[in-house]
Image: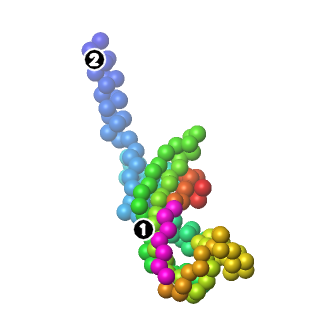
Amino acid sequence: MKKVIFCIVSILFYGLLFADEIATTSEGKKVLLRSDGKWEYIKNAVDDSKPSVQMARELFEKSIDNKIVKILTFKKTNAEEFDYYGQKIYVLYYQVEFEILQDCYYHLFDTYYCQLEKDEYFCEFQKKGSKLKYEDKKSFKKMENGWVEN
């Protein structure tokens, strides 16, 4: 009986010695290392990276009027990650400092309206050269092809 158990354990251990392994390249790509010395890239490998500050900055830049505003600094202040009904969510909190490039009525996300209506309730008059700080967050969700804006 001991010989049978020894044989079974030996076979299982032998199988583990020659099992395939998953490794990550210096570029962050996943590869499958086969026991016979061959390897291949793993398609649709799960990417454990997080959305970058640069990704959040680019989304922010698309939402503003670059003729009126120049970004001076953009920095991450906090982040949180959680599951929402099985969907991975990543929230990146940031602070941006920007400069006003011309005298104008200004609201960060609706400059066009402010230029037309000059609504002093909604828009503030800003002088050229004024420096303002703004804090907000960008939310991302994990999809098969990576993180996308939520």
On screen, residue 26 versus residue 142, left or right, reads left
Question: Which mark sits nearer the N-terminus, 1 or 2?
Answer: 2
In the rendered structure, the answer to whether residue 80 lies left or right of residue 147 reads left
In the displayed structure, would residue 106 be above or below residue 23? below
The magenta span reads 130-136
Whether 35 is among the magenta residues is no
Q: Quadrant location of residue 14? A: top left
User: Which residue corresponds to the image point at 57% horizontal and 87% vertical from the top-left?
Assistant: 102
- The residue labelled by disc 1 is 75
The answer to whether 51 is drawn above or below residue 123 in the figure is above
| Residue 116 in view | yes
Taking the spot 73% from the left edge, 77% from the top edge, the residue there is 117
Count the labels in the image: 2
Would you say the magenta stretch is mainly helix, strand or loop?
A: strand
The reply to whether residue 53 is in sight is no
What kind of residue is marked 2? Lys
Q: CA distance from mark 1 to mark 2?
A: 65 Å
| Image quarter (top left, top right, bottom left or bottom right) of the C terminus | bottom right
Task: Describe the element under mark 1 as helix, strand or loop.
Answer: strand
Point out residue 104 in the picture as x, y percentages from the top left corner. 61, 83
Percent across and percent down for residue 5 are 31, 18
Of residue 33 and residue 107, the one placed in the foreground of this image is 107
Q: Mark 2 — residue?
A: 3
In front of the other: 21 or 72: 72
- Quadrant where the N terminus lies? top left
Q: Where is residue 95? Give x, y as percent.
A: 45, 66
| Residue 30, x across and y down, in percent | 44, 55
